Amino acid sequence: MEFQGQLRIISPYQGDPSPELDQAWKDLLQYSNIWVTGDELSKINKTSIPVPGEEDKYWVELSVVHELHCIKRLCQYIHSEYYFANISAEDRRLNDLHTDHCLEILRQSVMCHADISMITMTWEPTSKYPAADFQNVHECKNWDVLYEWQKERSVDMMKPGFLVHPYLGVPFPDGYYHGIGAADPENAIGKGGEDTDMEMEMD
């Protein structure tokens, strides 16, 4: 697949805040929460929260979706005056933590996948500086196929009262997460750093 590589790229996922921009991201991430079977989970030697009322279905999110979520969050962070205009000092701290988490997740992913397609250089008649040509061919997964697979396995974990913590109760009584989307380090999962909770795409 050849990327759009020009400096000004026309995309529904970028630009100033607007209802159309928010809807594009919502549509892209609407099947973030999906189920897999216990057998599928056993292949990575992990378990996950069971889907309530379902037999052998466990809640997961694909890493690619989390990374897209992170890109969306970075876009929102750039326009904090619009998306985070009236948050408290504590929420601002957690938002900064969340943003740092997303930057590091994306760095690790980029280096993990290490796209080695070549960016060529050229001379332009109107500038003395070399210009990079980013419009080159990349080997890609078929996003449409993956999107449909997620759609078939999507589960609404945000339904009011649907999800219940074993001893702390219902996390989303009204079907919405009201936090800024990051956990304090003392409640985080992971090793070698202060990780955030699993972000759930809700907006």
Image (cartoon, helix red, strand yellow):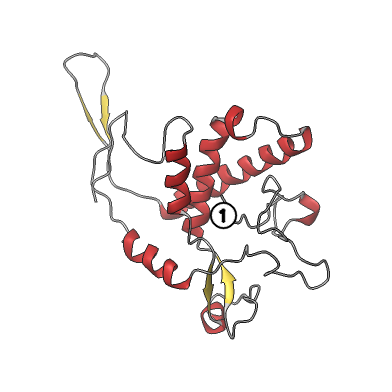
Q: Amino acid at mark 1?
A: Glu
Residue at 61 percent across and 66 percent down: it is 157
Tell me the quarter of the picture where residue 38 sits.
Answer: bottom right
Look at the picture and state if 63 lies above or below 47: above
Look at the picture and state if 155 lies above or below 177: below
Apparent side of residue 33 relative to residue 87 in the rendered image (left or right): left
Q: Nearer the viewer, residue 18 or 36?
A: 18
Look at the picture and state if 80 lies above or below 193: above
- Can residue 126 be seen in the rendering of this structure? yes
Outermost residue toward the right in this view: 167
Tell me the quarter of the picture where residue 187 sits.
Answer: bottom right
**Badge 1: how crowded within 10 Å, few (<14), some, or many (20+)?**
some
Residue at 65 percent across and 30 percent down: it is 85
Q: Secondary structure at mark 1?
A: loop
Look at the picture and state if 169 lies above or below 36: above
Residue at 46 percent across and 47 percent down: it is 25
Residue at 60 percent across and 31 percent down: it is 80
